[in-house]
Image: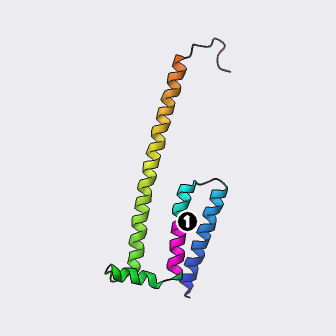
Amino acid sequence: MKPTYIAIVLTGIGLALGIVYLVRRDHIYIRQALFWLAVATASFLLAVFPPLIDAVGSVFGIAYPPTLVLLAAIVVLVVKALLTDIALTKVSRDLRRLNQRIAMLEAERPDDPSGPK
């Protein structure tokens, strides 16, 4: 096995272990962890079975199959960025609605002469 393949295998294993550690420490949600574990698994599989890249590239008629890996990485990261933006928009909307509800509840409450506690 070539040294670059060994480096990719070790990177995939390290990424997987890092993701599991982050999930155990509750620093990353399971939904995001599944995405990154899929990335780690894909890098591991492509490093262990390098002819797989050539086979998939020839099926799609790509002259230089390693560019397929770069194209796939770009597409996956763009989709991931889009999904992250969608999630951020939802959280922002929910936070705005929650703040509005709190403001309405505070407006309905009679004033407390003793002030906040």
Find the magenta span and give its range: 37-47
Furthest residue toward bottom: 1
Q: Is residue 94 magenta?
A: no
Q: Is residue 107 left or right of residue 17?
A: left
Where residue 46 appears, x then y in whole percent?
A: 49, 78
- Residue, x 52% and y 67% (percent of image)? 38
Dividing the picture into quadrants, the one containing residue 2 is bottom right
How crowded pointer 1 is (Cα within 10 Å; few <14, some 14-19, many 20+) is rated as many
- Residue, x 43% and y 56% (percent of image)? 81
Mark 1, secondary structure of its residue: helix
Where residue 8 appears, x then y in whole percent?
A: 55, 77
Furthest residue toward top: 113
**Relative to residue 85, is residue 79 depicted above or below?**
below
**Relative to residue 18, is residue 112 depicted above or below?**
above
**Relative to residue 76, is residue 68 depicted above or below?**
below
- Residue, x 42% and y 75% (percent of image)? 69
Prevailing secondary structure class for the magenta stretch in the rendered image: helix
Where residue 39 appears, x then y in whole percent?
A: 51, 68
- Residue, x 42% and y 49% (percent of image)? 86
Quarter of the image for the N terminus: give it. Answer: bottom right
- Between 40 and 2, the residue placed more toward the observer is 40
> Which residue position is annotated with label 1?
37
Q: The residue under label 1 is which amino acid type?
A: Leu
Q: Is residue 11 left or right of residue 63?
A: right
Q: Which of the colour schemes (rainbow, by chain, secondary structure, one colour) is used?
A: rainbow
Quarter of the image for the C terminus: give it. Answer: top right
